[in-house]
Image: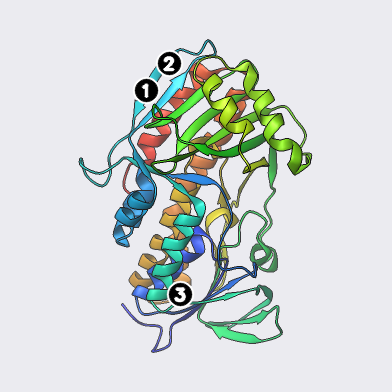
């Protein structure tokens, strides 16, 4: 349906997973799309992430699931390991894109960005780096946008896909608290051990650790450090400090520690969550992805929500006669699903900190199965 006239134009702020997916989905439906990305660099940094079944299902709609599988590492099982180093259970994840294709894919963030960026540009999306939005003003059915280089745009739709600290959300006057959960997450790039053909999660007496393959020869180690302030440590100390934290874990973690010590790619980040209650929009301006709903990483589903957002927004705009009604339908369709995932991730983080792992594991399994339901 095209009731917006001949020039449906969208400005998207943020060239991350949500922004690039929304841009591609809108461009395929005839929108003229421009992305303003604050980073001056085309490439993105980062370690790795999991594309769970809902992520792959949404990417398959865009024809990108197989490209992501080829660039990453396909898996179908999460193995939980007790504090004594023995496996306690396995979660067999549902294969949402076919029995012969993986249930999830571990992938390096730069590889995912490369695939999404290339597809957006192939669809005619213009990406402008080193720019952000500084002012927004709804004028009837159009939005006046001022960019940080002093230029102006008048568009049919403004999408804030600029993360948990969204400046677009602030410009729209949509307030939401950003909560620190008392956890710092470490990640280190390491060679993939031969036994790591799925995700392994290791329960500890204080912290939780894990290993996620992201290619045939690489993986990332993660450790969730509990009960610490969100302080900053010198980069030069990160590898040795992470290796020290892993000494508390028996079993196969002892094989991982030397790989971490030798890693030149280690980061430590605070676990923040946010959920925007009420409207996600003001007029024809809307926020998506982490700008609207940022879960803790325990469910590995932030990317799934972001990718789904982009597809659903384009679908609802296509189905409705005005941008405003399309956005309202989008929020109605997404809010409960996203709220549930964010709330579940917060609960799991609390159970981890209380060392109640046996309660957290079935909750993770149940939430993955709930996320497997149609969007």
| Image quarter of the N terminus | bottom left
- Find disc 1 in the rendering and name its residue: 90
Q: Where is 254 relative to 49, above or below?
A: above
The residue at the point 59 percent across, 30 percent down is: 349
Looking at the rendering, which quadrant does residue 7 occupy? Answer: bottom left
Q: Is residue 24 left or right of residue 205?
A: left
Q: Along the line of sight, which residue is nearer the eye, 169 or 14?
A: 14
Determine contact: label 3, label 1, CB under 8 Å: no
Q: Residue 311 location in percent, x, y?
A: 39, 62
The residue at the point 32 percent across, 51 percent down is: 57
Q: Where is 40 relative to 105, above or below?
A: below
Element under disc 2:
strand
Determine contact: label 3, label 2, CB under 8 Å: no
Query: Looking at this rendering, what residue extends furthest in the left direction?
Result: 99
Q: Nearer the viewer, mark 3 or mark 2?
A: 2
Q: Distance from label 3 to label 1 (Cα)?
A: 45 Å
The residue at the point 47 percent across, 18 percent down is: 81
Element under disc 1:
strand
- Find disc 2 in the rendering and name its residue: 87
- Find disc 3 in the rendering and name its residue: 323
Q: Distance from label 3 to label 2 (Cα)?
A: 51 Å
Determine contact: label 2, label 1, CB under 8 Å: yes
Point out the tag, 3 or 1, that comes first from the N-terminus: 1
Looking at the rendering, which quadrant does residue 257 occupy? Answer: top right
Q: Residue 374 location in percent, x, y?
A: 31, 47
């Amino acid at each position: 349906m095209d009731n917006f006239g001949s020039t449906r134009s969208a400005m998207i702020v943020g060239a991350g997973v949500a922004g690039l997916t929304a841009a591609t989905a809108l461009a395929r439906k005839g929108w003229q799309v421009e992305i303003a990305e604050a980073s001056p660099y085309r490439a993105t940094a980062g370690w790795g992430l999991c594309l769970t079944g809902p992520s792959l299902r949404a990417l398959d709609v865009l024809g990108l699931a197989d490209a992501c599988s080829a660039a990453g590492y396909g898996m179908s099982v999460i193995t939980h390991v007790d504090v004594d180093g023995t496996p306690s259970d396995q979660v067999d994840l549902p294969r949402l894109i076919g029995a012969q294709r993986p249930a999830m894919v571990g992938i390096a963030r730069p590889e995912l960005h490369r695939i999404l960026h290339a597809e957006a540009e192939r669809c005619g999306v213009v990406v402008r780096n080193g720019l952000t939005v500084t002012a927004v003003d709804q004028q009837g059915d159009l939005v006046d946008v001022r960019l940080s280089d002093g230029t102006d745009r008048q568009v049919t739709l403004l999408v804030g896909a600029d993360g948990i600290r969204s400046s677009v959300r602030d410009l729209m006057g949509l307030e939401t608290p950003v909560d620190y959960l008392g956890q710092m997450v470490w990640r280190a790039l390491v060679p993939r051990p031969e036994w790591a053909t799925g995700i392994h999660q290791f329960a500890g007496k204080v912290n939780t650790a894990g290993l996620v393959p992201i290619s045939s020869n690489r993986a990332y180690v993660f450790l969730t450090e509990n009960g610490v302030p969100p302080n900053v440590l010198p980069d030069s100390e990160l590898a040795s400090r992470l290796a020290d934290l892993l000494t508390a874990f028996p079993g196969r973690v002892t094989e991982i520690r030397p790989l971490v010590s030798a890693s030149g790619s280690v980061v430590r980040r605070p676990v923040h969550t946010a959920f925007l209650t009420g409207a996600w929009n003001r007029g024809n301006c809307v926020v998506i992805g982490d700008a609207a709903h940022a879960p803790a990483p325990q469910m590995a589903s932030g990317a799934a929500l972001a990718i789904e957002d982009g597809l659903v927004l384009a679908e609802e705009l296509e189905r409705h006669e005005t941008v405003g009604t399309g956005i309202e339908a989008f929020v109605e369709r997404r809010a409960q699903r996203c709220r549930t995932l964010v709330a579940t991730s917060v609960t799991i983080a609390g159970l981890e900190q209380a060392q109640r792992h046996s309660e957290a594991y079935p909750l993770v399994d149940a939430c993955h199965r709930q996320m497997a339901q149609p969007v």
